[in-house]
Amino acid sequence: MLVTSLHIGASSVSLLIAQRNDAGEIAPIDFLEQPAPLAHDIFGRGAIAPATTERIVAILQGFQKTLSELGLSTTDLTRACATNILTEATNHEPFLLRIQVACGLRLTIIDDGEMTRLIYLKTQRRLLDTPAMRKGNSLVIHVGPGNTRALMFHNGEIARYTSYRLGTHRTREAVQESHTEGTALLEVIRQHASGNLEQISIDYANDTIESLLIIGYEAQLIASSLGKPGSPCTLRQLKQLTQQACLLSDYDLVHRFKLDYHTAEALLPAMQIAISVTEILRLNQLYIPHSEYEQGLLHDLLISKTLIGKFEQEVLRATRILARRYLSDSRHGEHVSRICQILFEKLQDLHQLGPHEFLLLQCAAILHEVGSYISPRLHHKHSLYIILNSEIFGLNRLDITIVALIARYHRHAMPQAEHPHYCDLSMDDRIRVCKLASLLRVADALERTHHQRVNFIQVSHSGGKLTLTLPNVNDATVERLAMQSKSDLFTQTFGLEVEVEVEP
């Protein structure tokens, strides 16, 4: 089966045509890439220039001609995505409209959640070919066009995730007005990045980082100049190469590293950021993959949506780390999560939600009491604030908002149209919040004692009633009382009164 993946990136537009076999393995057939100054416009002027839009339209139409010659659909691509920095352009919606009108393509902007999935996939490959990353603490730094993301692995598993408003093209456009060149430009770049670099230093000050991996479009273009595949390069080697590069004109950089001009502009920021991160971590060497970044990205776009199992466990691990940070009762949170799982599975015919919503419910159950760190009395509102202002690996901002609202509505007031954050959601997302929060309220009522008394539940519904029978519980008075105040959202959402019974 032939599959296609299109990416409008920060400095280029690329297309992968590949063969997917019955086992889901993908083998590249053809790769096309053309430069386009998207990031230059976005970070330089805040909007995409008409000339850039038409340049990209022309590239896409050329790609479509190639697809047509191969007998493939020119509009129904397997994946068609645009870089996440596109949302920073004031005219990103007219840009997307122009692409759809001119090429018949509906582009999806890569969000934070998908970006972390893509970085996760890249990192999993590095865990296979870089043995040093499998033990101890390893830090993976993804230096993107607008943002830098850091994933710390402990013995091959994610232990922390942070992100920073620091990127190659964002930095390049910010220092452009300095009109400096050579080694002076490297110093300006370092100073501009100093605030974010200091934050990275603070965030990982208490961790002993034993290996560092830098990934990113520009960084990986210079890997072949720094050593053999799979081997680390020294900080000294990287500094020497950067010193050489800063003395070259853009024309010479293009020919020296086989780049396009738009990428060449962001090369020095990428190199200097890599140097600075290595220095603040007090390391003498680092790893930079030799693989083709863009081809790998296009490959991963074809499989990122199908990630299950281990990736979901990484999301839950990150959620538990956040819960521990705010001293939440882990036994209670985990037990509420288990009850949520029982209710979610047995009431599938009612809520008709999918695996992603179940993941969000699990996260909310684990985190619903983190607000007690600030105040037990209003902990549901404080939980909302803490979750909204936190990062959870693998979840985008909408996901985090939904998790925060589910946690906020686990007690007291039900969702109201005028409530902050809830009022900003679409109707479909409000319905998701109501369904999931109603399940969390019922589960929390069944764990009212915080003693994990309820482990098995028989669920049935008919005649306007949901009956929850609790085997091995002799007296359910506490659970019934709690359900009287917590089942209201379930009744409002699904039209069923909730009754708690014990086996005779």
Image (cartoon, grey):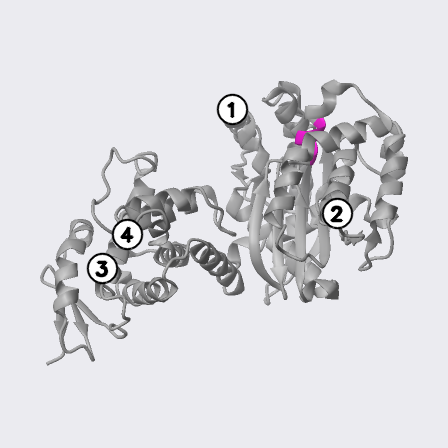
Mark linked to residue 494? none
Mark in front: 1 vs 3: 3
Q: Secondary structure at mark 1?
A: helix
Front residue of 462/339: it is: 339
Q: Secondary structure at mark 4?
A: helix
Inter-mark Cα distance, 2 to 4: 44 Å
Residue drawn at 80 percent across, 53 percent down = 285
Q: What amino acid does circle 1 point to?
A: Pro
Q: Is residue 343 left or right of 174 when viewed as pictured? A: left
Label 4 crowding class (10 Å Cα cut-off): few <14, some 14-19, many 20+? many
**In terms of sequence position, does the residue under pointer 4 or pointer 3 come before the other?**
4
Point out the stretch of residues depicted in magenta: 168-172
Residue 130 sits above or below residue 146 on the image: below
Q: What amino acid does circle 4 point to?
A: Ala
Inter-mark Cα distance, 2 to 3: 49 Å
Q: Is residue 504 left or right of 56 when viewed as pictured? A: left
Residue 386, x across and y down, in percent: 40, 45
Mark linked to residue 442? 3
Tag 2 residue:
278
Tag 4 residue:
437
Q: What amino acid does circle 3 point to?
A: Val
Front residue of 430/318: it is: 318
